[in-house]
Amino acid sequence: MKKIISVALMLFIAASGFSQTDLDAFRYSQSNLSGTSRFTSMGGAFGALGGDFSSLAVNPTGIAIYRKSEITFTPSIFVGSTESTFLGKTNSERKFNFNFGNAGMVFTHKFSENDETPGWKSWNFGFGYNRINNFHNRSFYENTNPTNSLTDYFAENAQGVGYDNLDPFYEYLAYYTYLINPDSLNNYSAAAPNGNIIQRRSSETRGSMGETDITFGGNYSNRLFIGGTLGFANIRYVENTTFEEIDRENIIDTLNQFQFDQNLTTHGFGFNFKFGLIYKAADWVRLGATVHTPTWYSMSDDYSSRMKAKFDGGYADTKDSPDGTYEYTLTTPFKAIGSLAFIIGKHGLLSGDYEFTDISEARLDAAEASFADANDVIRNKYTTMSTVRVGAEYRIGNYSLRGGTAFTSSPLNTRYITGGADFKKTSYGGGIGIRDNDLFVDIGYMYTESNEYFQPYTLSNQDVPGVKNKVRSSNVTVTFGVKF
């Protein structure tokens, strides 16, 4: 696998090869607010509330709050957009996705109808699916780089290496299409060594992370509620990128343009455990606590590349890489959550969660390779991450009004924050609910934004301009449910 030492110095480098890097650990160690409409519209602040199927993804004890059995189903429309600024020029792209944020059922078995007698009141069992992350998005940027080219990067990495030993996904493609050229000592020169070339990159990602949860919970004396979940997590991530350089002003000798296509598909399957409790300190106060174990993933990457080059005079060439595949493991960090909720009579509630995790504890591994370099980057680049969620609900007869917000601190050590892009995340939600006897319909909306930074490649003796991305998403959900 390609090993790039400079990944420790830069953020999210596109040309880092198909080797597994800190970006994989970062991407799959996070979750976004998704699931049922009530959950998303209240900012996911359900650690001390329960009674909602998606709350089982925060605190499995939420299942013990149920007094009746329930089935829920949540279709949603997700819109991801990215505003990219490269050398002062801004471009925007977006992508729509229809998906299912939740499908689940809860079964309640009551032991006693007498609320005055101490003891176990009920045991509950739940089974279903919650979507916890959505990868659908597009991005695009374009401008003239006055100082260097991606061909400089290929030439630098190829120095001293015979053409038959060049990386078949990168430098060999550049060699075959004459974007880098060797002398008798395998010293390579770049086709566009001094920049002054238009660079543009388009990217489309799709896929999701989700969990199928098997949850048990119990209600003791309507005062103490306990619960546990066995979660089976799945990942599907697809990324298709095209990087182009164009000599539109005929400044560069011989080279007219080239295009570098990369395709990556990642699948992962893992499992985790969640344990929690909710304590009713008074009729109007609830306290919650939860621990999530790490998720242990088995991962598989499939990847390929293609290079197309066109030169002055009409000569053109294309070279495809072989199809690559690689299997490895990923362990995400554990989470701890503390929660507090206030029940305001029969009409309202206010709830808050504090979640703690440490991205620097994520680890990559494989049977036949060492990930010591990548894991050192994870330890050094990332830090503890806190998420605060607050939600409120007010009921008027059969109708409910809801709102919520969530804020996630930067996962990066301060020395790695570039261009003001700290990867903090802020979300705002709102929604309504309608209940009629044992049927209910909830509508929710969640808006999320963050500032991110991306660098397409690095050079040992030159600065390479990066891209600042403002990433936004909107998620509209409708939950249909029935109690029985």
Image: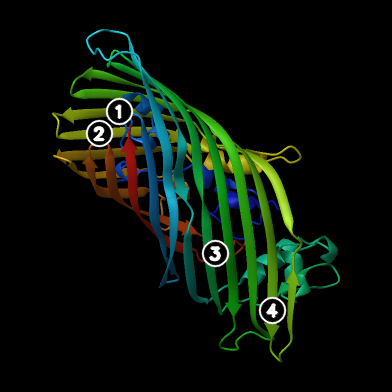
Is residue 436 positioned above or below 241 on the image? above
Q: Where is residue 233? Give x, y as percent.
A: 54, 38
Q: Amino acid at mark 1?
A: Ala
Point out the tag, 1 or 3, that comes first from the N-terminus: 1
What residue does disc 1 label? Answer: 48
Mark 2 secondary-structure assignment: strand
Q: Amino acid at mark 2?
A: Ser
Mark 1–mark 3 Cα distance, whole angstroms, equals 49 Å
The quadrant holding residue 85 is bottom left
Mark 2–mark 4 Cα distance, whole angstroms, equals 58 Å
Disc sitting over residue 351 in the figure? 2
Q: Is 215 left, or right, of 297 in this rendering?
A: left
Point out the tag, 3 or 4, that comes first from the N-terminus: 4
Q: Residues within 10 Å of mark 4 (few under 14, many from 20)?
A: many
What residue does disc 3 label? Answer: 463
What residue does disc 4 label? Answer: 309
Point out the tag, 2 or 1, that comes first from the N-terminus: 1
